[in-house]
Image (cartoon, rainbow, N blue to C red):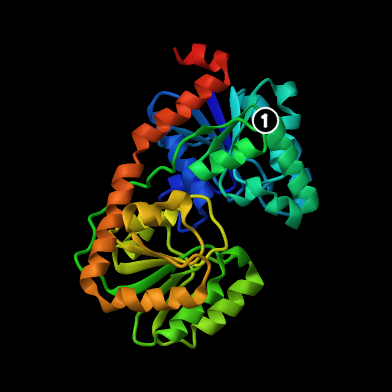
Amino acid sequence: MKLLFLSSYAHLVLERSTSRVSGGAELQVALLARELARRGVEVVIVGGDTGQQDGVVIEGVKIRSGGQFHSGNPVAMLAAIPRVFSVIREERPDWVFLLGWTAWMAIVVAIRAALGYRAGFICGLDSELTGDFRRENPVRGGLFEWGVAQCDLRYAMTEHQRALFAKRGWSCGMYRNLILPRAFEPAAAKTVDFLWVSRCQPVKRPHLFLDLVETLPGSSFEMVCPREDVNLWESVAKRAATLSNLRFIEKVPYHEIQSRYDAARVFLNTSEWEGWPNSFIQAGLGRTALLSLAVNPDGIFERFGLGLYAAGDFEKLKADARSMMADEAVLEGMQAGCARFVAEMHDNAKETEAFLKGLDGGSSESKRRLE
């Protein structure tokens, strides 16, 4: 069996020599591709052109260049279709998968008959299933939803997403996020009170984090904020430079980022919505408590006691932040709960098997080939 993932920067996760960074969706594609390759599945990642060597194999995963399909520019996307078509035709995969919203979902579905593969979708964010993306981006969102409706196999990452798929009348399999394995042991001391890590996008609401920094001048903060929305990033960077209790970092490579979680007492999420944040897993690996404004996938805050959830109330978030710093024993209990959450809910071998089981159910032909 051969799988091909179309993912803008997933190959950067495997290229340990690079200092470039990307987001959680690309991280998950890379981790899944690597685990599948270790099980003897032939895997290809078609990434955006970042100067990578076309056809190089890294950790068992073949890397191809798909041109500028990832740029977000409609003209560039259309211009990249012949390149992507050509690569898929050369590779002859059984499945082509995408993780997260993109108008490429419709293109992948539209050309599958000509190239003889099956198309799969992995949900990254709840908004991909609630219609929010389509309402904000009518054309691209409409193409995306048509592609999801027409594809051969879908995966949820949370029970809530599975319910959203069912509400739309779409069947799905399920597996949970994989873990980026540790490359080093954690440092003994925690030196930062609050950590924020995310690409600079409006949905991540980075200025709310800066509001909290201003509210708690006696606490230490660190912000890792790779540039994406340029205007937003410049406004965040300018404001961050005025805050003496904040260390602002533009980017940290994947293979180094865990050290930032290890050093933090609390990881803070200010996003409007997420799916299942990779950052929550990395916080658990670092034995770091969670503080979330609006994200609580599958009720993990109540189930594991891993931190505090403000249910969208920023005033409560500020009060929660103060209370977490006020009682070291309670905070240590939350940190232990976050570590337990990862230990109980995330296992790369188990989740990779769940993904493969979904392929079995999605295609009897794939099942025969696996056997």
User: In this figure, what is the number of numbered marks?
Assistant: 1
Residue 278 pos. (x, y %): 44, 52
Q: What element carries label 1?
A: loop
Residue type at mark 1: give it. Cys
Residue 254 in the figure: left or right of residue 153: left
Residue 159 in the figure: left or right of residue 289: right
Does the image show residue 182? no
For disc 1, the marked residue is 151
Residue 195 pos. (x, y %): 39, 69
The answer to which quarter of the image holds residue 352 is: top left
Quarter containing the C terminus:
top left
Residue pictured at 75% horizontal, 54% vertical: 135
Residue pictured at 29% horizontal, 67% vertical: 263
Residue 12 pos. (x, y %): 49, 49
Does the image show residue 120? yes
Residue pictured at 57% horizontal, 18% vertical: 363
Residue 70 pos. (x, y %): 66, 49
Residue pictured at 53% horizontal, 75% vertical: 208
Q: Which of 154 and 258 is in front in this view?
A: 154
The answer to which quarter of the image holds residue 234 is: bottom right
Image position of 52 with respect to 211: above or below: above
Q: Nearer the viewer, residue 12 or 227?
A: 227
Mark 1 Cα within 10 Å, few/some/many (few <14, many 20+)?
many
Image position of 294 with respect to 107: above or below: below
